[in-house]
Image (spheres, rainbow, N blue to C red):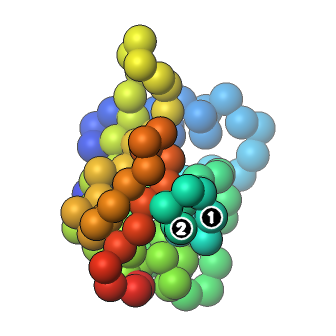
Amino acid sequence: MINVTDNAVRQLRSLLAAQAQDSRRGLRVRIAKGGCSGLQYEMALDEKKDGDAVVERDGMQFLIDGESIGYLRGATLDFHDGLTGVGFHVVNPNASRTCGCGSSFDTARQG
């Protein structure tokens, strides 16, 4: 599955605390077609759906749909808050090529 850093857990906890929503929500991480290299990461607060894989860490849930699991196997989800940018960041060993901006990627194997 994926690895989740302490920074990502803290940021998700902070995001959920600011919401007046149900505590069953988590961060959905999915792969979609698009971007300069063919695939891109999409993330949103969401609830678990049938077929989702769930990575739970320190009470926080990270949700991955069945189609995205193969693309994310062995990846690490982190959160950066620095001069070069703020946001969740995926380090993906399955990416064989990434674009210059770092927001999209391609892989030699499909899902």
Query: In the image, is residue 68 above or below residue 9?
Result: below
Q: Is residue 2 visible?
A: no
Q: Is residue 109 left or right of residue 25?
A: left
Q: Residue at x 49, y 33 (%)?
A: 87
Q: Residues within 10 Å of mark 2 (few under 14, many from 20)?
A: some
Where residue 70 sits: x, y (%)? 37, 81
Quarter-of-image position of residue 106: bottom left
Query: In the image, is residue 40 above or below residue 80?
Result: below
Q: Residue at x 52, y 66 (%)?
A: 39
Q: Residue at x 43, y 60 (%)?
A: 105
Amino acid, disc 2:
Gly
Where residue 53 sits: x, y (%)? 44, 77
* Residue position for label 1: 34
Quarter-of-image position of residue 42: bottom right
Q: Are marks 1 and 2 in contact (CB under 8 Å)?
A: yes
Where residue 14 sits: x, y (%)? 53, 30
Q: Residue at x 64, y 78 (%)?
A: 49
Q: How many marks overall? A: 2
Q: Which residue is more in the foreground, 75 or 47?
A: 75
Q: Secondary structure at mark 2?
A: loop
Q: Residues within 10 Å of mark 1 (few under 14, many from 20)?
A: few
Quarter-of-image position of residue 76: bottom left
Query: In the image, is residue 103 above or below residue 25?
Result: above
* Residue position for label 2: 38
**Mark pair 1, 2: CA separation:** 5 Å
Q: Is residue 62 left or right of residue 15?
A: left
Q: Which residue is more in the foreground, 14 or 74?
A: 74
